[in-house]
Amino acid sequence: MADRAAASGDDRISALPLDVRLRLLSMLPVEDAVRSSELSREWRGLWKKMPKLRLVGLERFETAEGFNKFVNHLIVLRGHLPLDKFKIDVRESETAERYPYVNLWIQYALICKVRVLNVFCKAVVDDCIQLTVPLVSERLTTLNFTDVDFEKWSALVDSKLSLDFSGCPLLKSLSMYQCTIYVDKISSKSLKQLLISFSSLSHSRTWISAPSLVSLELSHLCGQAPVLESMPFLQSAFIRLNEDQGSCDVMYPPVQKCGDQSCECCYGYHLSGYQSVLLNGLSNATHLELIAHPEVDVPSAMEDDGNHDPVEQTFACAHLKVEAQPVTLTS
């Protein structure tokens, strides 16, 4: 029928420019885009050239097994044509174990030189996708993760676990939501925007080295507040400290300090006469919002040397907001 319409000149969609047709296909669920090959010769195999792929789990498939089989067959048929955006969304799964090929799909996207990679694996139960594939790409600019465990992916550098993004020299934006990040260091020389929210950090302080960072958000984190290295280009920062982010595990309650001046968990690292956890990285921000639980000693979470009042430190901030979050009691 579609061929007869084209012959009579009524198939106006097939007459559209190639980039417009590809854009239309990209708006469809990927399984419907594949079926477009049945329309006419002009549409046959056109889906393989789509610059965007969005793989959604149980939204359109009755079982995880059926979805896995479809995606594996799709990437074989598509080959290694370039990709601009790639999204995996299996957040409706009952358990991450039902999707054993997620790392294979991520690796496929990297081979296709994807620019934006989104991995959403929000499970109903307390479960995460364990990232194991190396993130190495000369084209990748954006990474967004939800419910991903980075411990197995982290590299052992100088006997410490590190999320080293040096293999992605063009990476500009990194978002980690509800992720497990039990590492000693996160580093990227190119990163401009970093968001870590509702995630679990290491019980020993995680160091963040991102000298090109412009925007930073750290909020609702479990574990110790991270140590921020110098961020000379930082413009805006939003930091929300929980009640257990002011000191190490030696002390209870955790808002106290252990008294050991060499303890990085309580006192950070030595910097020009004072020891800083957050201050070194935040001092150049022009817009800074720091919100702390009322039981957190904000000065000890930021810096402590016995001689400096944190409000006397030099800030470049044009807009600085520091507040203690009120406690809400429920019966």
Image: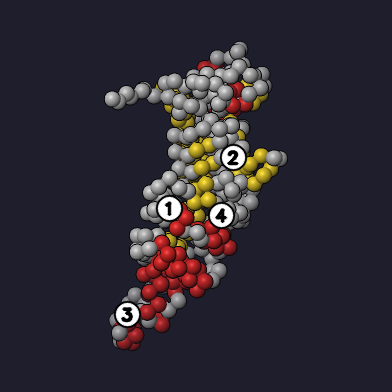
Select label 3 or label 1 by which is in front. Answer: 1
- Name the amino acid, label 3: Asp
* Residue marked by disc 2: 183
Select label 2 or label 3 by which is in front. Answer: 2
- Name the amino acid, label 4: Leu
- Name the amino acid, label 2: Val
Mark positioned earlier in the residue sequence (3 or 1): 3
* Residue marked by disc 4: 140
Provide residue 41's location: percent of width, then percent of height. Answer: 41, 82
User: Which residue is drawn at the image coordinates 46% and 58% (left, top)?
Assistant: 99
Q: CA distance from mark 4 to mark 2?
A: 22 Å
Residue 6 showing in the rendered view: yes
Looking at the rendering, which quadrant does residue 300 occupy?
A: top right
Q: CA distance from mark 4 to mark 3?
A: 38 Å
User: Which residue is drawn at the image coordinates 56% and 54% (left, top)?
Assistant: 140
Against 294, is 111 above or below?
below
Mark positioned earlier in the residue sequence (2 or 3): 3
* Residue marked by disc 3: 11
Mark positioned earlier in the residue sequence (4 or 3): 3
Mark positioned earlier in the residue sequence (4 or 1): 1
Specify the quadrant that holds the N terminus: bottom left
Secondary structure under badge 1? Answer: loop
Q: CA distance from mark 3 to mark 1?
A: 45 Å
Outermost right residue = 158
